[in-house]
Image (spheres, grey):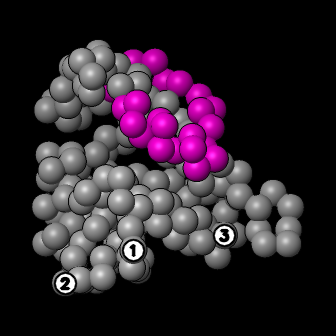
Amino acid sequence: MTGVHVRSAEPRDHADVAVLHHREWGGPYVVVHDTQYDLRELPTLVAVDGAGELAGALVYRLADDGLEVVSLAASSPGLGAGSALLAAAEAVALAAGMGRLWLVTTNDNLSALRFYQRRGLRIVAVDAGAVDRARRLKPTIPHVGEDDIPLHDELLLERRLTPPGGRP
């Protein structure tokens, strides 16, 4: 995406980010690793295109020696906003002294698996049945996901970070 700029979300971004989260997750709540998060309460990076329009948003938290990507969504996938947001999240993690960038996705999300693995993240764990458990907190999670794949499991992906001139 030519001319995309990533910055911390500002109050003027909240409505557009809310629309994006409603499209992607059905609202501001996501459930990962048996925890429900309100995306409105976590730090958010936004990608803005040259016209000043929201191109994507990445919600994160700093925990467990790393930056967890809680949500990453692009307004129009495939144009580079996701890559720019992920690179900015890595910079945030390194600035905070974190040793890894990590996230959870679901077993059906083949496009996300492709995206993240192409950017150096590796599958390090599978939590069988995690999505089934998550439905207790968020019953609107579908039973069948992308490509008609039954939706049951969470996959943990991570990439160890190396500070510039340092060791991982």
Amino acid marked by disc 2 = Arg
Q: Is residue 124 left or right of residue 12?
A: right
**Image mark for residue 34:** none
Q: Is residue 29 magenta?
A: no
The residue where tag 3 is placed is: 94
Left or right, 22 with reference to 100: left
Local crowd size for mark 1, using a 10 Å CA cut-off: few (<14), some (14–19), many (≥20): few
Any part of residue 29 in sight: yes
The image's mark for residue 12 is 2
Q: Secondary structure at mark 1?
A: loop
Q: Is residue 105 above or below residue 77?
A: above
Mark 2 or mark 3: name the one nearer the start of the chain. Answer: 2
Tell me the quadrant of the picture where the C terminus can be found. Answer: bottom right
| Viewer-proximal residue among 143 and 118 | 118
The kind of residue on which mark 3 rests is: Leu
The residue depicted at 30 percent of the width and 76 percent of the height is 49
Q: Quadrant of residue 38?
A: bottom left
Residue at image location 54% in from the left, 65% down from the top: 87
Mark 2 or mark 1, which has the lower sequence index?
A: 1
Of the two numbered discs 3 and 1 on the same chain, state the one appearing first in sequence: 1
Please give the label number shown on residue 2: 1
Whole-percent x, y for residue 7 in the image:
41, 80
Tag 2 secondary structure: helix
Residue 59 percent across, percent down from the top left: 37, 61
Q: Looking at the picture, does residue 23 appear above or below residue 49?
A: above
- Residues drawn in magenta: 109-133
Is residue 130 visible to us here?
A: no
Q: Secondary structure at mark 3?
A: helix
Report if residue 122 lies within the magenta region: yes
